[in-house]
Image (tube, coloured by chain):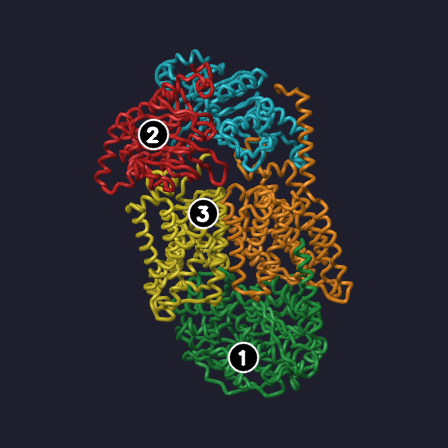
Chain colours: A green, B yellow, C orange, D cyan, E red
Amino acid sequence: MTRIALLAAAAAVAMTAGAVAQEGPIKIGASLPLTGNFSIAGQKHRQGYQLCIDLINEKGGINARQVELIVSDNRSDPATAINQYERFINVDDVDAVYGTFSSRLTFPVASILAKNNMVHPVPAGGALRIYTQGHKNIFYFQPNAAEYAGASLKEVIETLVPADNRPTTAAVVAADDFFANAIEAGLLGTTVTDPADGSVVADLSPGYLEQVGIEVVFNEKWPEEGFNDWLNLANSIKQSGAELIVGLTASAEEAVQLTRALKTVRATPKLVYLSQGTQAEFAEGTGSSADGILVHSSWHIDAPFQSVLVGEPFGNPEFAVAFKEAYGEVPDEDSAIPFAVCQAIEQAMTATGTTDNAKLGEWLSARTNDDPVRTILGRFAWDERGLPVDKPHLMTQWNDGELQFVFPTDEFKTSEMSYPKGGF
Amino acid sequence: MAHTLQILILGLALGGVFALMGAGLSLVFGVMRIVNLAHPVMIIGGAYVAYWGFRLWGVDPLVTLPIAAVILAAVGVILYKVVFEKEAKAATYSEMTVLLTFAVAMIIEGALGTAFSNTQRVTSPDYATDAIFIGDIFIPTGQLYAGIVSLVIISGLALFLKYSRFGYAIRATTQNRDAASLLGVNVNLVSMVSFAIGVGLAGAAGALVSFVFSFFPAKHWEWIAILMSLVVLGGMGSILGTVVAAFLLSVIAAFVGAYVGATWSTMTFFLALFLILIVRPQGLFGDKPELA
Amino acid sequence: MASMDQSAVLEARRLYNARLALKADKTRAVWFPIAVLAVLLALPLLQLTSSNYNYVLHLVLYTASYVVMASGWNILGGFAGYISLGHNVFFAIGGYFAGMIYARYGVSTIILAPLAGLVAAVVGYVIGRITLKVRGPSFIISSLALVMIFRILFDNWDFVGGAAGVSLPAIDLPVKWAKVPYYYAFVVMAAVTVYATYRIKHSKFGLGLRAISKDEIKAESAGIDTRFYKTLAFAMSAFFVGMAGAVWGEYLTYIRPNIFLIILVSVNMVLMCILGGKGTIAGPVIGAILIVAFNEACVIFFGGSEINILATGLVMALALMFFPLGIIGSLARSGRLPRILNWD
Amino acid sequence: MLTVTNLCKHFGGIRAVDGCSFTAEAGKITALIGPNGAGKTTAFNCISRTMAPTSGEVWLDGGRIDHLRPHEITAKGLSRTFQISRNLADMTVLENIVCQAPIRGWRGLMKPAMPPEEVAKAEGILEFLGISRLAHEDGANLSYGQKKLMDFAALLMSDPKIILLDEPAGGVNPSLLEEIIGHIRKLNEAGLTVLIVEHNMDLIMRLSHRVVVMAQGQVIADGPPEMVREDPAVLDAYLGGALEAA
Amino acid sequence: MTELLTVTGITAGYGDGPAILDGAHLTVEPGKVHCIIGPNGAGKSTLLKAICGMLKIRKGEVRFKGERLNGLRPDQIYRKGIVFVPQERALFPKMSVRENLRMGGFIMDDAHELDRRVEEVMERFPILKERAHQKAGTMSGGQQQTLAMARTMIIKPDIVMLDEPSLGLAPKIVKEMFEIMAMMAKDGITILLVEQNALMGLKHADWGVVLDLGRTLFEGPAAEVLGDPRIQELYLGGKRAA
């Protein structure tokens, strides 16, 4: 028990120390899943945040103050994530926070940050329910909510697939994961309810697949942990004879497993769409089987988005170069999204000249499509729920070991989509 | 009908891999009464050996298998010397070792995670994603090779235990440690070697796992209860039982996965484990528990 | 019975024993835990100052929640000797039961906690009736299987949101005071749990559990209804763990299977008891404080990483190898237990 | 008092106890003897229900007890010791003994563990056995013989009507044996019924009122000690000739 | 006189527990039967366990044919030719009688010789030959004890130490055990016997040792021990036994 007293004393000292150092660097906290189930994405998020902060500091900081990023590992555990944000706010006395990865961590964190009146920029946490709880100052940094992600697939089929050769049947398989379930809900047209009180969050019927005349002939879910039976699943998909395979995996690894299994059973669909798989690991794990697979993405290396960093223009290609320089790898969206989060907070701080979260929130909420936040993910402006307005997903396709950008076709130069997929 | 046969084949294919994964666990329990909860994380250790061999030099995991086995066996020796040799005399030995191996599992997981990060890995030799098609029915070659290798290793182990003098010593130590010691068997050495063999088997299994499943350090939690169910159903300590249980449960799980739902297929293992412990704690091939 | 009427001798014995008992009482410093409790109860007053002590409150609250769970676990694991690695199942049951009622009807989980504990206890009783047939390693393994089974069940139960879980409304209080209700709930629960374990240990029931942990066949033939005792112990420990779960859900504003049903939660309970001293009253408390402090130190020094898991494993292994009786147990055995920690 | 009829206990194919019937009369000392593997201890275990009998009946005081659980049997007044002394380590002798005090109902459950009246009674018993100086010793630290005495003490704590002793003389040195014989006799004189399994013929002949001989799971002789020792079947199966060694 | 085995002032105990043996002495002469008696808790079994290496010797030393045995493991001591049959008999319950006998010769490198000796022993004990394929765990107590004693003869040891071979056995079987022991002695095997039934033990012994409180109180010819009134009073159950 004396231990507690000691801790209390230590914490008290830490807090007063924080209060004194007002004119030090701007401190920003981010709790990320550096270990555990989401570790890969978590690590990449850290790289994205850190790169952005480093570039800002190189350019002289925000409002002439250097920026310090405090990252801690929440082991993919919600309780720890909350604990760490509390720590950022109360002990480290941070000026702002960056969001964490995944809906399941974002959910509880959102409540805590709202309670503390912090601006909550969300890099990954697409479930509608997060934004329908009435939190102020929460901003999502990906194209739309997960439930609407399937709309892009629908448009791809409508615009890029020859009308006489469209798939008519689909197998939809999904991880039992927040994000995957949400996309599935959109595709299948389910009503999204809040299990807390049974209320309807959104009615998505009839669903995007039905809208393009595709019948779902096989639908299966696998557990988020401990699933080994990929061949069995792939075999069932093949047996269903579906022409479109929709694989809503929770991670790149599952995408690899599913693709390998589909290859092993020699499935021959016309089109394959996965929710994960833009990462280099996917290419490494699947090799040439990846060819022709569609993956939606929030970001693409070739997308010529123009953005701003500390008042200077900073294009998406420059980001790729800077990333390659810093980490020796080609970035993917798991680093690009957090980079955009960092950009937005920087722009808010620069514009308002303060780190007061209430003002930052006001400024971000006031963005419109004509006067948006400009990030390497493109323009962002949000509706009152905190979801981006007018922001479709990008569709990418693996071809010859390269991730190509195939949709939307109206904004930038895109590659030709290969179709049909055929075998793996 | 063809579909049913296909599911059966897929179940059996997984069973072969599980058999080797469980065999070492069973051996260690049989000889030392250690429920080695760190066994699954050691399998992952073996898988990393195969992974780096494949990634750095393109060596086939089946070739790295003996190396993985030897490296892990060495880990086993160290672990035995540092942790379990002392514990052998403790009164609450069996419970103590369960908790200790649990702690060891966390240590190894932490070490592997620090060294290799928690990225999921998989090796991709060509056969891993190939299959032999007989009409509509296919046999995945990756699992097929893994199963064959696994059965060869287990048969070798069984022959060794049955006919070699050392195997004789192992069996004697299993049945009555003090007695074996009093008849000239160096039981400490026997324990150490069989622990090393058990952990070495984990290494070998790891090499197979590297191309059959994907893996990362924290994945072992998912395997603990699955492997335990094999060992318990087979009768703790009976290697033959473990093999039979591995095939049996994998087939059931495959059918559950296909007909009930993929989310329920792993439930087969856990439910089986739970029920067996309650209904027939000695397992399929175990002896009746000692009398009061 | 023969020769039982030697009243003079017996009277002398009685006096002698009374003296011994008095001596035992004197070595116990009852004032200390009470003083600690008083300090903890007064701690939220810090919030009246201009600074924000939320994190301190959070740490105390977090520790207290683990005191509740570890002390609860201690009833089965420490007293009766049945090591369960699956007690987070009851954490989940308590959390879900109270959480769902809170979500649907707005009844505070703090009020619901005893009821949630009761539900957990009933489930615990039923499970105990089944699993307590086996002991030793088999029991430990069965408890692991239990977690897995419940994990899959909760993951697939749509009513409670499946794997995605349910988010709960946050309490409507200003930031400074939002933690205080939960703080008091956990501190009071911790105090009640510790006192309850004390009472249990010193009752016939506790004596019976100790006998069971040493030799079950002997205990049974000594006239102890071992099956009932163990199951009751299982239910009681489930009760406290369930209570902690109930309030924990609302505190986090989120209930989800992998908040409750991850192995680390039950490992923490076990580790705290073993480190502090299995079967002692103060052990789980000391263990909880040390482990929470240790985790906090890990975050500070390593920024939290895989090394955390490694370090936790290392602490557990070292504790098991060198202090199998735990800190309190080892100190007590060597007669060096400070009076203020002798709560037994 | 205690009647066993047609008791059977099979382990797989082995019939350890195979239709054994005998009676232990109230207030008498009955001995159960027989060669190794005759099923004596198994019969004992079935009576105290440490094992479930395969078939057969056990009656105590006119009530059937073979379906009861061990603690219920203890509550009915039948207490037993074990062949190899079982005691509770890390608990004092006093705790070991008080542990055996009967508990009634829920309220009894939450009563203090060591109420003064029970402690006094336990001390009285220790006094009677002459080992009161061991009261606060850890049960595990006792010597073999002291453990046997502690078993006795615990037995008496539950106010039994009948006690079952499993090889009380096994591994006990001659002087302690004398002491134990003395205690058994004294208790019997105070009205306690005793059923005893023992190999020490000296003890049996001196103490028992009646001897039941078992072989291969069945009773082969039953009668007063003098008669049994002359029985040729017993001599052949068990004693191996005349009784000179003891 | 040439001693085969000498124990000088050894102290030993279990784990970190108190010393059970506290300066015990023992001299073992070749070819004789030695019987150790003493009350419960005197340290008789502990002494045998200390000699065979199952317990750590804290002080003092054990010498066998002049060689120091301290610190050797049980298996090493077995190879020297000292066999210990503990109270629990040290059998392998799931192995057959023949396999159990073969285990007795585990240290032998010559498999044919081992087979020959197993046959030889089985010839001498017809009951074992009869049950050669039965699992040891399913035999009666007496048969198990016979097997345990017979097994000691496989390696033709110098010393066999028996810990209460009569424990829990029917009088008829006890007699048989002593007969087997006599047979072993006739073969020239030195016997070290711990016996609770002191009278019977001493009757079959050449040499008696009285152990109490972990110390050797008396050593001498068995007849002398039997005849000593003080020893009778203290350790043989008083006048009755005399």
On the image, numbered disc 1 is attached to which residue?
Answer: A299
State the mark number for residue A15. Answer: none
Residue that appears at 62% across and 27% down: D122
Q: CA distance from mark 1 to mark 3?
A: 56 Å
Asked if residue E71 lies left or right of residue A357, the reply is: left
The subunit carrying tag 2 is E
Q: CA distance from mark 3 to mark 2?
A: 33 Å
Q: Residue type at mark 3: give it.
A: Lys
Q: Residue type at mark 2: give it.
A: Val
Q: Residue type at mark 1: give it.
A: Trp
Q: CA distance from mark 1 to mark 2?
A: 89 Å
Residue C24 in the image, given as x and y percentages of width and height: 67, 38
Asked whether the beta carbons under mark 1 and mark 2 sit within 8 Å of each other, the answer is no
On the image, numbered disc 3 is attached to which residue?
Answer: B86
Q: In front: mark 1 or mark 3? A: 3
On the image, numbered disc 2 is attached to which residue?
Answer: E28
Foreground of the two, B61 or E24: E24
Instruction: Say yes or no: labels 1 and 2 on the same chain.
Output: no
Is residue D219 depicted above or below A359 in this figure?
A: above
Residue E181 found in image quarter: top left
Residue A86 in the image, given as x and y percentages of width and height: 66, 66
Foreground of the two, D57 or E11: E11
